[in-house]
Image (cartoon, rainbow, N blue to C red):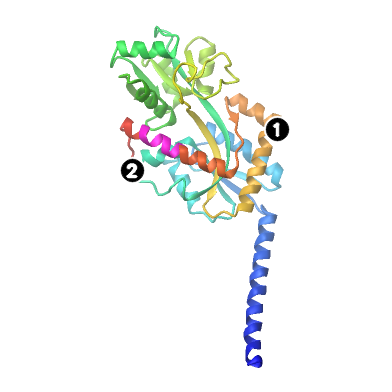
Amino acid sequence: MTTGQKPGLRRIAATLLATAASAFALGSAHAAYPDKPVRIVVGFSAGGTTDVIARIMAKELTESLGQSFVVENKPGAGSNIATDQVKRADPDGYTLLFVAVTSAINQTLYKNVNFDLTKDFTPVALGAKVPNILVVNPQVPVKTVQELVDYAKKNPGKLAFASSGSGTSIHMAGELFKMRTGIDVLHVPYKGSAPAVTDLIGGQVQFMFDNMPSSWPHVQSGKLRALAVTTKERSKSAPDLPTMQEAGFADFDVSSWFGMIAPAGTPPEVVNKLNAAMVKALDKPEVQKSFESLGAVGVKTTPAEFGQFIKSEVEGWAPVVKASGAKVD
């Protein structure tokens, strides 16, 4: 019996050694991450806010981790093409997605999406938020949010709000405002924020919720009037501008946000290394200065906190999208 057991025991021992060696090699590979260039996929064209913030972070990750982090633009279908591509990538940390609030909205907006933002990805870190501001044409006789609501109720169906496109976060902010106030106003979508702001200045539409960077210069020049900022805290760029909550609209916290996610199954060691590098970058004065020039605010999170944030955004925007009636096949 003893003699017959020895080959079996040797096989078991050999298997255990092989497993341990494999685990050690895998651990060593994760410890060495990254040992080759990393792709950061952006679902929008170069030059937009998502792209600019992604490139700021890519530069910092390159310097911090000693390998090139290269931004690759894959625009199309409201960023869904890029999101689906990254979902199908190997979960090794070498293909990442710089995700924006748009993807959370798209889960409900698009009739058919090939990904679940909360299940098919591993959250890495939330990097930045850009506040929206409620702006009106100066000819509209209002100076506060409540005055705008009262004016709209006295003129049902006569006011129109602009957006950068149907289903965008700017559009959804306007729809949320409609839901919360019960006002009867018309939505006018444009192909981008710039033409929307142009028509707002020209008086073709009366108000809009816009990302601060594109509207604030026109507020400063007097071409637009700002009523409130949509984040919980006042903006450092506009400290005298009240928040929507201060204006009487509790829990009205709407902003564009940007962060890093990876394919589901990406090793925790890789995720934590990326998270630590991003958090470290947000403390650098030059990064903070770059963000301020965009009207953005750096936000530090753990991977778990970012995952919970994404879940809350997907769930929070769903009823707004449904109420708006917006839908994309």
The main secondary structure of the magenta stretch is: helix
| Number of marks in picture | 2
Residue located at (46% from left, 45% from top): 117
Where residue 300 appears, x then y in whole percent? 62, 36
Q: Is residue 319 magenta?
A: yes
Taking depth in this image into account, of 218 and 133 the one nearest to the observer is 133
Q: Residue furthest front?
A: 1
Image quadrant assignment for residue 109: top left
Relative to 30, residue 299 above or below = above
Query: How far apart are the alpha carbons under marks 2 and 1?
Result: 41 Å
- Could you tell me if residue 47 is visible in this image? no
Relative to 216, residue 104 above or below = below
- Pointer 1 residue: 284
Q: Is residue 123 left or right of residue 33?
A: left
- Residue 111 has which mark? 2
Residue located at (67% from left, 74% from top): 17
Amino acid type of the residue tagged 2 in the rendering: Lys
Quarter of the figure with the C terminus = top left
Quick one: SS at disc 2? loop
- Residue 218 has which mark? none
- Could you tell me if residue 287 is visible in this image? yes
Q: Residue furthest left?
A: 157
Where residue 315 appears, x then y in whole percent? 42, 38
Relative to 50, residue 72 above or below = below
Q: Is residue 33 left or right of residue 257?
A: right
Taking depth in this image into account, of 133 and 317 the one nearest to the observer is 317
Taking depth in this image into account, of 247 and 126 the one nearest to the observer is 247
Amino acid type of the residue tagged 1 in the rendering: Lys
Q: Which residues are magenta?
A: 313-320
Image quadrant assignment for residue 258: top right
Quarter of the figure with the N terminus = bottom right
Quick one: SS at disc 1? loop
